[in-house]
Image (cartoon, helix red, strand yellow):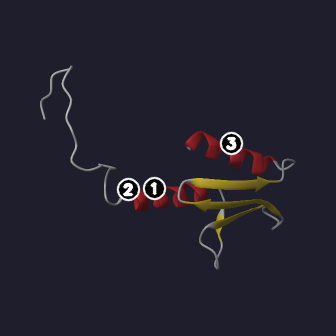
Amino acid sequence: MRLEHHQCVKLKKAVYGLVNAPRRWWTRVRRDMAKLGWVESTTEPCLRCLREPGGQLIGLAVAHVDDFMIAIDQHSDLAVDALQQLHRAY
């Protein structure tokens, strides 16, 4: 469409983007969280766990669509860094 700066159009139906946009979003979130050390639960795909190298649980993250609830051990540098990187990415 070649519209002049002052022109507009009336849409017949809403346009929300690509059909596969939600899938691509979730794929990116999963990839980025995995890079940061978050491990997907085997029983609940919305749940991610973050552990110290010794196995101690230092973070939990639950994601639904584009809403996240994250709890971390604030005394763990690894958990704080992972949270800061998520904030920068999203």
Secondary structure beneath label 1: helix
Task: Where is residue 3? Give x, y as percent.
Answer: 15, 27
Disc assigned to residue 84: 3
Residue count near mark 1 (Cα–Cα under 10 Å), binned few <14, some 14–19, many ≥20: few
Distance from Cα at disc 1 to Cα at disc 2: 6 Å
In the picture provided, is 15 more to the left or to the right than 51? Answer: left
Q: Earlier in the sequence, mark 3 or mark 1?
A: 1
In the picture provided, is 1 more to the left or to the right than 87? Answer: left
Residue found at x 18% / y 25%: 7
Task: Where is residue 54? Give x, y as percent.
Answer: 82, 65
Residue found at x 21% / y 29%: 8
Q: Earlier in the sequence, mark 3 or mark 2?
A: 2
Disc assigned to residue 25: 1
In the picture provided, is 42 more to the left or to the right than 66? Answer: right
Q: Taking 32 as reference, is 53 above or below it?
A: below
Residue count near mark 3 (Cα–Cα under 10 Å), binned few <14, some 14–19, many ≥20: few
Single out the residue that lies furthest toward the bottom.
43
Residue at image mark 2: 21
Secondary structure beneath label 3: helix
Single out the residue that lies furthest toward the right.
75
Distance from Cα at disc 3 to Cα at disc 2: 25 Å
User: Mark 3 or mark 2, which is nearer to you?
Assistant: 2
Q: Nearer the viewer, residue 16 or 71?
A: 16
